[in-house]
Amino acid sequence: MTESIALLTIFVLAAFVGVEVISKVSSTLHTPLMSGANAIHGVILVGAIIVTGQAESALVVVVGLVAVVLATVNMVGGFVVTDRMLEMFRGPGARKKELHK
Amino acid sequence: MIATWAQLGYLVSAVCFIVALKALSSPKTARTGNGLGAAGAVLAVVITFVAYKPDHLVPILIALAVGTVAGVIGSRRVQMTHMPQLVALFNGVGGGAAALVALMELGKVPSGETVAAIATAFTIVVGAISFSGSVVTFAKLQELMTTRPLTFPGLPVLFVAGILGGIALSAWLVTDPRVWVGVLLCLVGLAVGVMLVLPVGGADVPIVISLLNAFTGLTVAAGGYVLGNTLLLVAGTLVGAAGTLLTKLMANAMGRSVFNILFGAVRGGSTLG
């Protein structure tokens, strides 16, 4: 019981932190922020590895490996695509150069 | 329970995610923030391998390599204008992964652990909604299907029926955690996800992606509860909360309300008014 209360406490506090940290986002960054947050929930990969690593039947292992692939795509792809989006925010000089290409 | 050092490492990783989100909200620090988030994620994965010593290590590493290659190629090759649909797709596969993790944990939830059982059911159904909804948004933005709002006469009724069915199956799953009920719940979630996104017009799709992103965050948090893993709980909750606020901010910036975006096309249909 104490452990579930501890987890519940973490949940509630993290929810407040999540709202607070992005409350001052500038509107130009809405899409990259969404993409960055998307990459962060790719950390479900940790869950996929744990569950697959404890699997006993072959079917569960296969399903687990699918989950590992999907979660990795979410995590790795998410961070890379966010980085590409943010390349556009390097500064006015760099952006002008690209526009004149 | 895993070793103390691993839990502390997860804490470092969670702090990385918090600082990353903060840094991503400002143009000057955004890129560093993204890098920090990636560092936190890599740290978390390394800790997991060392602390849990998973069986089937070689297949897991191969799966990891396959996912990495697919993710990098996908996001490197995509044109700038096609990025939103790629984010939608990444979000969808994340939700799908969470649903699969919960399905696999289904047999292990001890009886009497009602909260854990509810969290498992939640992860399965919302993960499935996020997956199929994201696939439909991808298809819309990629113009594989019409970008106009799609609705048919029975849609609102079917949508409500899907939600009620999902709740009923979840309740069943909580009292009697059978895998086939979980699979059925997953299918209902997939159908609800499709029906949720079909009536949304092309211009509003980015906001729905943000909403589904928040959904996936919450599924990951629930998955963290099921596995007793604090990092998943913190990271998922962060994304769920931040994503919900971000969805609202994006809708405000377009002068729309989230409710109107989702249900505007079926308004006046019947039950959803």
Image (spheres, grey):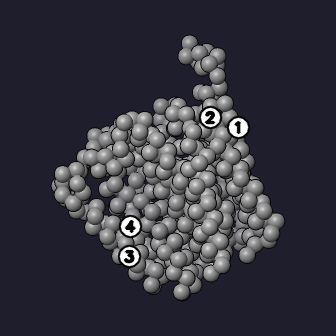
Tell me, yes or no, whether the two marked residues, 4 and 3, touch with CB atoms within 8 Å: no
Q: Earlier in the sequence, mark 1 or mark 4?
A: 1
Residue type pointed to by label 3:
Leu
- Determine whether B142 is above or below B103 in the image: above
Indicate which disc residue B169 carries.
3
Q: Earlier in the sequence, mark 4 or mark 3?
A: 3
CA separation in Å, label 4 and label 2? 40 Å
- Real-space Cα separation, disc 3 to disc 1, in angstroms: 44 Å
- Could you tell me which residue is drawn at 77 percent across and 68 percent down? B51
Report the chain holding disc 1: B
Residue in the picture at 35% in, 44% down: B257
Chain of the residue on which disc 3 is drawn: B
Q: Quadrant of the C terminus of chain B?
A: bottom left
Q: What residue sits right under mark 2 in the picture?
A: B26
Determine whether label 2 and label 3 are within 8 Å by CB.
no
> Which numbered circle lies on residue B156?
none
Label 3 sits on a secondary structure element that is helix
Say if mark 1 contacts mark 4, CB within 8 Å. no
Using the image, tell me which numbered label, if any, was put on residue B187: 4
Circles 1 and 2: CB distance less than 8 Å? no
At a point 57% along the width and 57% down the height, the residue shown is A15
Quarter-of-image position of residue B164: bottom left
Comparing labels 4 and 2, the label whose residue is closer to the camera: 2
Vertical position of residue B178 compared to residue B137: above or below: below
Q: Tell us which disc is closer to us: 1 or 4.
A: 1
Q: What kind of residue is marked 4? A: Leu
Q: Earlier in the sequence, mark 2 or mark 3?
A: 2
Which circle, 1 or 2, is nearer the viewer?
Answer: 2
Residue B185 percent location from the top left of the image: 40, 71
Mark 2 packing: few (<14 Cα in 10 Å), some, or many (20+)?
some
Disc 1 from disc 2: Cα separation: 10 Å
